[in-house]
Amino acid sequence: MKKAFKILVISLFAISGVITALFFYFQKNIQPILISEINKSLAVTVGVDEISVTRIQDFPKIGIRLSTISVDERMSFYNYKLIQADELNLYVNLIKLYQGKYSIDEILIRGGTINIADLENSNNYDIIKPTDDEKPSNLSFEIDQLKLVNCNIRYHHTPSKIKINGFVSSSVIQLKYSEATTVIRIQSNFKNLNLSVNDDDYINKKAVSFNTKFNINTSLKTITIYPTNFTIQ
C-alpha cells in the first residue's frame, strides 16, 4: 500500500513538473506566435510590446495580458489608431473552447483610446480579413464581459453628422452573437461627455451614465432597443 502511494505521489510530481515546464515554455514563446496569428486573421496591423499569461493554478481558465497594444484603422479617418491601450486582458476557459463553445469570459481594456467612425458606405473598424467562404455559418459567439476602464471614446457617424467624445471611467458590455442576431447590453459611466449633431451641442462636458440593451438582426435589418436608464448630471 505504501509503495503504491509512493508511486502515485512521484507520478503526480512528475506530471506537475511537465505541465509547469510546458507552461513556462508557452509563456516564453507565446508572443511571436500570437502576434503572427492575430495579424494573419486581421486586415490591419496589431502591435504589442509584451504578452504574458496567467498562473498555472488558474487552469482550465487562462488569461492573456497584452501590454501597450495598438490596432490600426481599416480605413484612414481619424489618422490615429483604432485602439491604443496600456493593457488588454483576455480571459477564456480552455475546456469551453475545446467543446466548441466560443465564449470569452472577460476582456478588459485599461488606459486606452478608441476611435470609431461610420462613413457613408464603410467604416474604420471592420478589421476582420474577408474570406472566400460563402457557405452559411451557424457560429455562436459570446463575450460575458467587455470592460473599459479609464478609456477615451471618440465616435463619428458621418451620414447624420453625430459626434460623441468622452472619457469612460467604467463600462461593462455583454455581447452574444448567434446566426443573424446580436444582443448587446451596456452599463457605462462617462465623464465630460460631448454629443453634437450638425455641430450643435446637445451634451457638453457632462457626467452621463446609462444602462441599455438592444438586439440587431442583420437578416431582417432591424434594431430593437429595450427600456433604457439614462442619467445626465
Image (spheres, grey):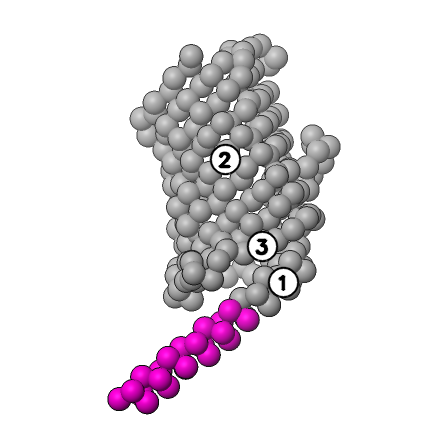
Residue 19 left/right relative to 32: left
> What's drawn in magenta, residue-wise?
1-21
Q: Which mark is residue 148?
A: 2
Q: Which mark is residue 28?
A: 1
Nearest to viewer (mark 1 / mark 2):
1
Residue drawn 49% across and 74% down?
17
Circle 3: residue type: Ser
Above-or-below relation of 30 to 107: below
- Nearer-N-terminus badge (1/2): 1
Above-or-below relation of 54 to 74: below
For the residues labelled 1 and 2, say whether their Cβ atoms are less than 8 Å apart: no
Label 3: how many residues lie within 10 Å, few (<14), some (14-19) or many (20+)? some
Circle 1: residue type: Lys
**What's the CA distance linking mark 3 and mark 2?**
20 Å
Hey, which residue is sitting farthest left in the picture?
Answer: 1
Circle 2: residue type: Leu
Residue 226 left/right relative to 140: left
Q: Which structural element holds mark 1?
A: helix
Q: Which mark is residue 61?
A: none
Q: Position of residue 201 (x, y in %)?
A: 55, 10
Q: Position of residue 147 (x, y in %)?
A: 46, 38
**What's the CA distance linking mark 1 and mark 2?**
28 Å
Quadrant of the image occupied by residue 172 = top left
- Nearer-N-terminus badge (1/3): 1
Q: Which mark is residue 52?
A: 3
Is 12 magenta? The answer is yes
